[in-house]
Image (tube, rainbow, N blue to C red):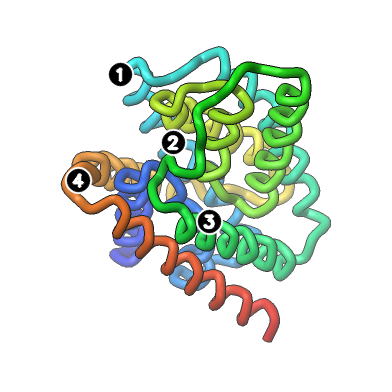
Amino acid sequence: MGILGFTLAGVVGLLLGVLGGGGSILLVPMLVYALGVPPKEAVVISLPIVGLTSMAGAISHWMAGTVQARSAVAFGLVAMAGAFAGARLSVLLPAVAQLGVLAVVMLAAGVTMLATRSPDAAVPSAGPAGGPRAWLAVVAALAIGMLTGLIGIGGGFLFVPALVLLAKVPMHAAVGTSLVVIALNAAAGVAGYIGTIAVPWHFVLAFAATASVGAVVGSRLAHRLPARTLRRAFAILLLLTAGFVLSDVLF
């Protein structure tokens, strides 16, 4: 994989560990622009990397008792259907369209992070369940899942608020539960690409192992670093990367 590849894997893992999610959104641009992987292959490669890294984090949360298994399975099964459909749909889209959608999602994520004063500020406590809420949960899970299959993102920055607001998962359990959902989602996305693009598993396993180590280190550093400053810096990085990808797509 090379020194650059291992370095990027460590960076992705550190971001995941420090921020608790969202770091994997940079994975596809890293693969495309730093390692020279074709965009469609980068999306496919990113899915098992995100899934394996998320599963490693989910196991840690499971042991700590911060995973709601019932919500993870229910939300995850719906998201898996969306991820599979998104993967199938991506075959019909040109690579430039996938990169364009990714850039727009990155812009939205960066703006949201800059506008949010604290990680939980935009996520109010879950209220009582209602009929419309259940349907919204299904729609949200399908939509986020489809984005996963289409552009290869983990979707943690979307799954966490959706689980809290729509599935009534307590905030302290939402991150761990979302990691399980992401792992299931990524697996469905990989299944959707079977027969279209081959997965270089030697690269995936090496990258995921390195990212997992980085995630463990990042989780230990998270309490010692200024969370708000880190999130703002990451948001700016997202906006800059999104701008670069959009300029590449458009010009």
Q: Which mark is residue 112?
A: 3
Query: Quadrant where the C terminus lies?
Result: bottom right
The residue that label 1 is drawn on is 64
Q: Residue at x 33, y 41 (%)?
A: 212
Q: Which of pointers 4 and 2 indicates the residue nearer the eye?
A: 4
Q: Amino acid at mark 1?
A: Ala
The residue that label 4 is drawn on is 221
Residue 205 showing in the rendered view: no
User: Which percent across, then down, holds residue 204?
Assistant: 45, 47
Q: Residue at x 44, y 47 (%)?
A: 202
Question: Which residue is situated farthest in the right direction here?
Answer: 92
The Cα atoms of the two marked residues, 3 and 2, are separated by: 22 Å
- SS for callout 2: helix
| Corner quadrant of residue 62 | top left
The crowd level at tag 3 (other Cα within 10 Å; few <14, some 14-19, many 20+) is some
Q: Which mark is residue 54?
A: 2
Question: Which mark sits nearer the N-terminus, 1 or 2?
Answer: 2
Q: Nearer the viewer, residue 241 or 122?
A: 122
The crowd level at tag 1 (other Cα within 10 Å; few <14, some 14-19, many 20+) is few
Q: Is residue 185 left or right of residue 17?
A: right
